Amino acid sequence: MRNLSDEMLLEAYEKALYLKLSDDFIAIIRSEVERRSLTPALNH
């Protein structure tokens, strides 16, 4: 995950939500978003 840019990470998160991927996978992405302090970009 650390190799992804912030933009790519947020796109992956949005796509995972859109595709209704597993909650565990979404949680992994979300925790990385939060680790990077990108949470204001989350609208979900």
Image (cartoon, rainbow, N blue to C red):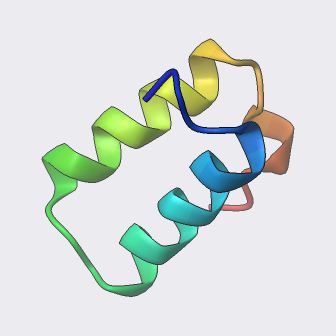
In the image, is residue 26 above or below residue 36? Answer: below
In the image, is residue 43 above or below residue 14? Answer: above
Outermost residue on the top side: it is: 35
Q: Is residue 44 left or right of residue 42?
A: left
Q: Where is residue 26 in the image (x, y as percent from the top left)?
A: 32, 51
Outermost residue on the right side: it is: 40
In the image, is residue 17 above or below residue 31? Answer: below
Residue at horizontal 62 percent and vertical 61 percent from the top:
44
Q: Position of residue 2 (x, y in %)?
A: 51, 21
Residue at horizontal 62 percent and vertical 64 percent from the top:
11
Closer to the camera, 9 or 34?
A: 9
Quarter holding the N terminus? top left
Residue at horizontal 41 percent and vertical 40 percent from the top:
29
Q: Where is residue 19 in the image (x, y as percent from the top left)?
A: 32, 85
Q: In which quarter of the image is residue 33?
A: top right
How many marks are shown on the rendered structure? 0
Residue at horizontal 56 percent and vertical 69 percent from the top:
14
Q: In this view, does 30 lie to the left or right of 19?
A: right
Q: In which quarter of the image is residue 17?
A: bottom left
Closer to the camera, 13 or 6?
A: 6
Q: Is residue 8 left or right of residue 39?
A: left
Closer to the camera, 8 or 24?
A: 8
Outermost residue on the bottom side: it is: 19
